[in-house]
Image: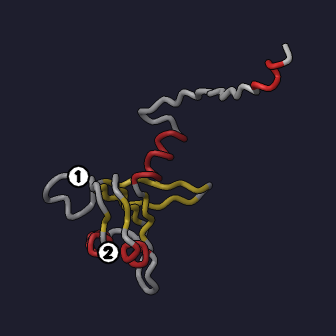
Amino acid sequence: MGRSGDGGIDGLGVYRLSLVSFPVYFQCKRYSGGVGPGVVRDFRGAMAGRGDKGLLITTGSFTGDAKREATRDGAPPIDLIDGDGLCDLLKKYELGVQTTVRQVEEITVHSEFFTDV
């Protein structure tokens, strides 16, 4: 999926929880700014009749209105992952990234110690 004519769905995964599993539809947006509520509504509309679980992922961020729309009463909730959250997940599951821990020392010289030496 993820091409023109995909009906607003970029992909489908299956979430398995013990003996139960259900489809999760997702859409990815490459944004440098904020994703607004219209994108959330459009994605929810694309999911209509297909499933009730959706995940909207962006490299940018979500506006406050988009966050409110994603959890609006009476509508299927959409989980949101912004750019920071996406980076955290890539790091956590080591997907395409490698983390190197560096230790930095800061040394302060106490000159009064050396005046009597």
- Asked if 58 appears above or below 107 in the picture, the reply is below
**Residue 40 visible in this rendered orientation of the protein:** yes
When the figure is inspected, residue 88 is found, relative to residue 35, above or below; the finding is above
* Side of 109 relative to 16 (left or right): right
Dividing the picture into quarters, in which one does residue 57 lie? Answer: bottom left
- Is residue 49 among the parts visible in the rendering? no
| Residue lying at the far left of the rendered structure | 4
The circle on residue 73 is none
Q: Which residue is mark 2?
A: 37
* Residue found at x 66% / y 29%: 106
Q: Is residue 10 left or right of residue 80?
A: left
- How would you rate the neighbour count of disc 1 (Cα within 10 Å): few for under 14, some for 14-19, many for 20 or more? few
Q: Residue at x 44, y 74 (%)?
A: 77
At label 2, the amino acid type is: Pro
Q: What's the mark number on residue 2?
A: 1
Three-letter code, disc 1: Gly
Which type of secondary structure does the marked residue at label 2 adopt?
Answer: helix
